[in-house]
Image (spheres, rainbow, N blue to C red):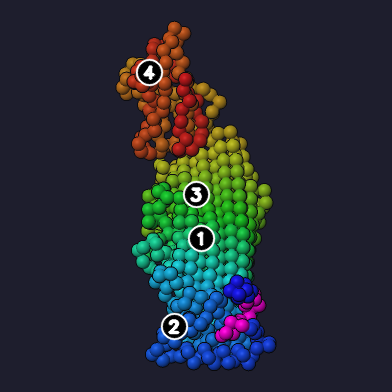
Amino acid sequence: MGRRNFLRDILLWILAFFFGYTVNEEGGKLFNQQDGDEHGKKLSDKVKTLIDTSSDHGKKIDNISKKAEGIIHVKEFGAKGDGETDDTTAINNAIEYCFKNKKTLNFGSGSYLYDKKTTWYINGEFNGHFIDWIGMGARIIFKRLDIAYIAFYKMEYVHLVGIDFEGPAAVGGSPNQNAVGIAVYSTKRLIVNRCSFINFIGDGLLISSEQIDNRKQSSQNIKVQNCYFSNNGRGGLTVVGCVSGVIENNHFGAERLMLAPVVGEVLHIESDPKTRYGVEGLAICYNLIYNAVNLTNSTWTEGYIGEKDTWINFHHNKVIVDDNLYGIISAGGNIKIIDNEIDVTRNTTADDLGIGALFLKCNSAIIERNTIKTKGKGTLISVYNWTHGTKGKVIFRENNYTASHCSYIYRFFKDIGGSFSENHKIVKIQNEDFIGVTNANWLLSAPQSGGNAQKYFLEGIIWTHQNGMEFKNTTKNHILYLRDCIIVGEDSLISWNNVGTAIKVYYENCNLSGTVATNIPTYPIDLAVVYKISGKINDMDINYPTSIIGRKNTLTKISKGKYKWDAFSLEDLYNYSFSAQILLNSKETGFYNLSFQKPTNDKGLLTIEIKNESNLLVDLPDNSGIQIIGKNLSKNAISVVAS
């Protein structure tokens, strides 16, 4: 008998979940809105007698918990869901009951009006409480313009599925930009699936962390999937101070609500460096996004850059922006924008900064394999040097560009009004595809206002337009490397405004054409040559000349078995590695090992050490030699092959 009742109860709850049925007080019959209005009215009356605003409200709630089991339907608390009745009180009672008793709240498929005059805060205090709301396309319609709506704090778990949240949008009154739909603060696990957020003055969905210096109490493990955001004011989805999560397969609509005092991005990711921890790992993927996106990750102010692999990964999204300042703005550090389609239209001929596809204010960013399209005259990529401790690195790799009447592909700037005085260490532009770019002016402009990267490294670039590269306000630290490039400037190949020290240009295997500004030194690099030091190399007072980069430099013995190479500091040639081979005389049968030692700082010089089989520093025998081959790689690839 007990087994039969158990199976019956399971069946009843399954029907209740999927069809909006509920169980009567005795647990026997099922009813729905069509065939059970009278029963529902009676049950609603019973619930109302138990839930009121009297002083023993909590005791009445406890009494209900003894009778109810499983999923609770909001209509059991008197909600009509007819789209006309104000269901605020019934919804609040149902929310409070399910929260206190750890029950799932089912909204079914009704339309519920919500007209509460004050914000409804629910604090879980991390004591095991959760919010679990389900619906079969239910609508909760918020009516007021002057308030924020429902907020959850410090929950172990928040689950919202199958519910449409709708704001007042066109209703009159004084709009409040903080009037968000649903806000979730400092929650350990969050799942929002198959929901929509439309017509809110502020954000449709706000996910944030309280301003507390506690990593464990930051929002984390969020998942927003298969949702729809449209016609919101400040932002459709805003995520602030969240540690980790996934935002995928969502649709951010083209409609924007212009009532709000601040009209922001439809998707806004932010970490506040002053009061909140940065994003540790957040993937944003496979979304269709109309209007601008903001990706801000200030983790480097907390010391994570270089110490921890913390990234915002924005990949496989489609971003379509019509007449906005930019497609994606990204600030802070550690941003990856990979394998996206970005399409930006500008209905103006202005050429201000930030009106293109990407507007980067980043410490570290990787922009790779994106399809980038712009319409209208302007700059495609703008990069400011929001760097910290010169650790910044910005990489553009294998992106495909389509643009007409393009003034600049890349413009690099210093943030004059900001507190970030350091430059990026490296900018790399590799194997970019400009075949779809027409009527273009400059490929690159840097470092305007005297800032941004110290080293610009271009590889595999084909560019044949009006001008090549211009440099402004350069210092002795600015270097341009070109490898395997075809760059033709019909007017100017390399321009310099004669302010500061001329940029140094190193190039190898390139076809370069156009005017080069006076006083810019260029150094061709011929890696086909083997540079050989031979003869008697053990005298302390002899310098051994080489010319690996087209300028004279020397190898000087500084002690037994140790030689200093005066041309190769990390400051000057960060991206070289060397292969070396010891050439012994025909009579010598001993074993020797050669190694390069990296300097301890950027301004230090490379040294060569020679050791015997006992790992002791030794001089080579007379008439022996060292054969050296230079190879252009990366700063961290300085290595040696010795025999």
Residue 13 or residue 245, whichever sits in front = 13
Q: Amino acid at mark 2?
A: Asp
Residues at marks 2 and 3, CA–CA distance in whole angstroms = 59 Å
**Local secondary structure at mark 2:** helix
Queried whether the magenta region covers residue 409, the answer comes back as no
Mark 3 / mark 4, whichever is N-terminal: 3
The residues colored magenta run 12-28
Residue 293: horizontal and vertical position, in percent?
A: 55, 63
Mark 1 / mark 2, whichever is N-terminal: 2
Mark 4 / mark 2, whichever is N-terminal: 2
- Residue denoted by label 3: 394
Dot 2, crowdedness within 10 Å: few (<14), some or many (≥20)? some
Residue 337 appears in the figure:
yes
Mark 1 / mark 3, whichever is N-terminal: 1
- Residue denoted by label 4: 612
Q: Amino acid at mark 3?
A: Val
- Residue denoted by label 2: 62
* Comparing labels 3 and 4, the label whose residue is closer to the camera: 4
**Local secondary structure at mark 1:** strand
